[in-house]
Amino acid sequence: MKIFIVYAHPEPRSLNGSLRDRMVATLTAEGHEVIVSDLYAQGWKAALDGADFPAEAAGTRLDVVAASHRAFAEGTQTADVAEEQRRLLWADAVILQFPLWWFSMPAILKGWVERVYAHGFAYGVGEHSDRRWGDRYGEGVFAGKRAMLVVTTGGWSEHYLERGINGPIDDLLFPIQHGILFYPGFSVLDPFVVYRASKMDAQRFESVATELDRRLSKLFVDAPIAYRPQNGGDYEIPSMRLKEGLEQAGQQGFRLHRS
Ligand code: FAD
């Protein structure tokens, strides 16, 4: 199968760099084709701005959504963005790998999403009417593909549990897993999270890497997170509110969107 890793760490000799190398070696040994976008090494431009739309007339007010739509539809996107879109379309599975920085992804990776996810490509797709709010949340350009996060944190695992000071990790990752991955159609696997990354030595690294190998071997086998598809009948139209009574007792917050 074809695996696309989007990797966001500035230091190749970091823990993330070691885990990235391990993933490439493991996946390649299993017979997969692997492409890595190493955002810092590529000098990825993080900010979405007017330079992304070279065909827009100079001096016109920048309407980002409209400009993104035109550039994607008319093939006038910058070459770096078009190449990342090509890699996404090529892949059967996409892995986003990053250290947790301020409870989210590093800015360079957020900028990758903002620039690569063009209007008409990853959003603004399908029928938008009183009856339907487009092809999203389970449908979209990446339907049929799998995605997984590989994340390292400084905080302990206990800090990310239900009553932990940082909040549950599933809640913190919800905007990425549900908003960035499920929205344009990916089936999202549980994340692979390495907590308390600073407490790493050769022995722990080997055990973490072995568990990562195991997860990679199940990339096309493990059941994805059971997010509710937008157009599967669970949401009222057009308010897009989850219908009353579908939740289990006590289920609330982001967890409402899991069936
Ligand atoms: P590194 O610092 O490169 O390495 C970690 C340890 O692993 C080191 O001891 C290193 O020697 C060892 N190591 C590396 N490779 C190997 C190997 N092959 N074998 C054995 N040992 C190895 N944390 C949170 O929990 N929440 C936050 O919100 C948060 N925000 C942050 C914001 C910023 C701006 C920064 C800089 C850090 C933040 N952190 C946060 C901490 C951050 O998540 C961790 O520093 C990061 O996840 C560690 O990953 P790394 O790849 O940078 O590790």
Image (cartoon, helix red, strand yellow):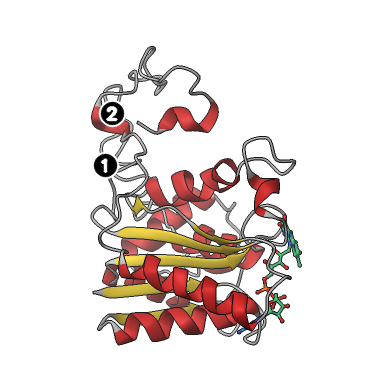
Q: Name the residue rendered at 32%, 33% in the picture.
A: 230
Pointer 2 residue Cβ closer than 8 Å to ligand 1:
no
Secondary structure, mark 2, is loop
Work out how far the residue at label 1 is from the one at label 2, CA to CA, in angstroms: 9 Å
Whether residue 2 is situated above or below residue 176 in the rendered picture = below
Q: Nearer the viewer, residue 113 or 61?
A: 113
Q: Name the residue furthest front.
A: 203
* Residue 48 percent across, percent down from the top left: 58, 61
Task: Judge whether residue 16 can be spotted in this image.
Answer: no
Q: Nearer the viewer, residue 175 or 173?
A: 173
Task: Judge whether residue 109 can be spotted in this image.
Answer: yes
Label 1 Cα neighbours within 10 Å, binned few <14 / some 14-19 / many ≥20: some
Secondary structure, mark 1, is loop
* Residue 83 percent across, percent down from the top left: 39, 76
* Residue 54 percent across, percent down from the top left: 50, 70
Q: Nearer the viewer, residue 210 or 148?
A: 210
Q: Is residue 233 left or right of residue 14?
A: left
Q: Is residue 64 left or right of residue 85?
A: right
Image quadrant holding the N terminus, namely bottom left
Whether residue 26 is situated above or below residue 141 in the rendered picture = below
Q: Name the residue rendered at 54%, 27% in the picture.
A: 253
**Three-letter amino acid code at disc 2?**
Arg
* Residue 216 percent across, percent down from the top left: 36, 69
CB within 8 Å, label 1 to label 2: yes
Q: Name the residue rendered at 65%, 52% in the picture.
A: 157
Tag shown at residue 126? 1
Q: Is residue 107 left or right of residue 67?
A: right
Tag shown at residue 132? 2
